[in-house]
Every structure is written in C-alpha cells, then in structure tokens.
Amino acid sequence: MKAVLFDLDGVITDTAVYHYEAWKALGTKIGIDIDEEFNEQLKGVSRTDSLNLILEKGNKQTAYTEAEKTAMATEKNDLYKTLIEKMSPADLLPGIKNLLDELKAKDTLIGLASASQNGPVILDKLQINDYFNEIVDPAKLKAGKPDPEIFVTGAQQLGVAVSECVGVEDAAAGVDSINAANMVSIGVGEAKNLGKATKVVPSTADLTAGLLEDVWSDTVG
Ligand code: BG6
Ligand code: MG
C-alpha cells in the first residue's frame, strides 16, 4: 500500500450533517422534504447533481431555469459556509489525526478525493493541510462519484498505480467510485449502505494504518 485517498465529508470530519442541514433548509423553502434516508443518496454527490436529485424527488426538474438553479445551489452553499465557519481541529472525527500521523510515519502518500469545492478551506480549518501530498480539484473533473475519475485522478497526481492505493469513503456513491477505479475500498458507516466496500468499519475510530494495510494485502498484495 503506497497511498491512501480520503473522502472528506463524513470521513475526516462530520460536515455531512451540515450539508444535510443546508439542503434540508433549501428543500423546505421549495416544498421538497429531505429526510435522512433520501440524504444517503446525496452523500458524495456534487452540489449540482445533489440539487438535480432533490428537484427530481419533488417532480420539479423542469420547474426552474438554469439561472434559478444556480441561485439555489449558491444559497445552499452560503448557508453551508456559515455552518462550517467555526470549525476547528476539535472537529476531526475520532482516530483521524492518529491515522494521518501513522501514515506519515510510514511514508504512505496521502491524497484528498472529495467532491467538495470547500475541501481546501475545511482542511485549513482542521489544520491538517500539511498531511496531504495531493488534493484532487473536483471542478476539473468531467464526472463526479460514482464515476471512478476522482480516485483515478488522485492516484495519478500521487504518481502511484490504483492497485497501490486504498480509498476511504462514507457514501455509497463514493464506495462505487473507488471500486470502479479498481482500488481497495474501506467504507465507514453501516454495512446496509456500504455493503459493496472491500471492508466496512462502523467508525473512523476503527481506521488504523495497520487495518488499511491488512485489508490491502489480503486483497491485492
Ligand atoms: C461531498 C459531500 O463531499 O461534496 C456532498 O458528501 C456535497 O454532500 C459535495 O454535495 C459537494 O460539496 P460542495 O462543498 O462543493 O458543495
Ligand atoms: Mg463523504
């Protein structure tokens, strides 16, 4: 295992709840209910694709112009940005700092494969940007998760083969993306959502360099 590619929201920090809260507020305004079950489909999915899924759910995919949709996505993002304003290193999920330290000590490369355009700001707030050798810019991708492009690009940026990487995700779309990239996938969360991952663990506290290496060598090595 030469590299680990991390998803951000829901893996490194619990911003998944802020994305949910911001979409829910927009949904309420336009009369579309977003519950936790539906929210699972939004995890890992880009801002534009998420809005389209929400409008589809409310049978409103043709109700708005492109300009109105852009304004709605901006409104959601503005609320999201106020929700993440006060984030600090205390918002790192359990075990993540330790995992990053373990990987650094082993000279394992670390990359960010997040669909979020707010990723670099959040790494700053968490004070962990120095750990990351590469960050994939989601704005430059042709296709979002579950397409493999983001994880394949991450491996390319790090200069390693996909077979030498492990990807870590909390979303079904993300696990599908890692698997489609032919990488070993670790899902953090419930097996009912992430059953296709090479290995599912219930919490980020279970993520150690040893576990990632064991899963990788049992699968590829
Ligand atoms: C993903 C989140 O990491 O980023 C999604 O899981 C979110 O919920 C996506 O929609 C895009 O994020 P942003 O910050 O660019 O709107
Ligand atoms: Mg996520």
Image (cartoon, grey):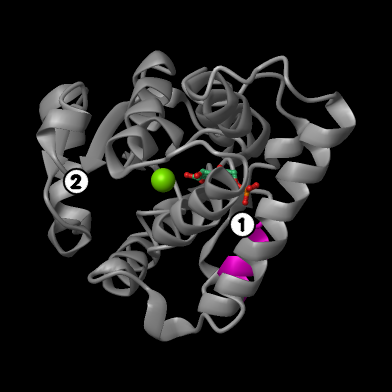
**How far across and down, in percent of the image, does residue 94 sit?**
24, 71
In which quadrant is the C terminus drawn?
Answer: top left
**Does mark 1's beta carbon lie closer than 8 Å to ligand 1?**
yes
In which quadrant is the N terminus drawn?
Answer: top left
Q: Please tell me which of labels 2 and 1 falls first in the chain.
A: 1
Is residue 131 highlighted in magenta? Answer: no
Position of residue 104 relative to residue 32, above or below, is below
What's the residue at 64%, 39% (across, down)?
Answer: 47
User: Which stretch did the figure color magenta?
Assistant: 118-124
Is residue 217 in sight in this rendering? Answer: no
Q: Quadrant of residue 36?
A: top left
Position of residue 172 relative to residue 33, above or below, is above
**How far across and down, in percent of the image, does residue 41 sit?**
39, 30
Residue hosting label 2: 189
Q: Secondary structure at mark 2?
A: loop
Residue hosting label 1: 119
**How far across and down, in percent of the image, does residue 22 sit?**
55, 56
What's the residue at 40%, 77% (across, down)?
Answer: 91
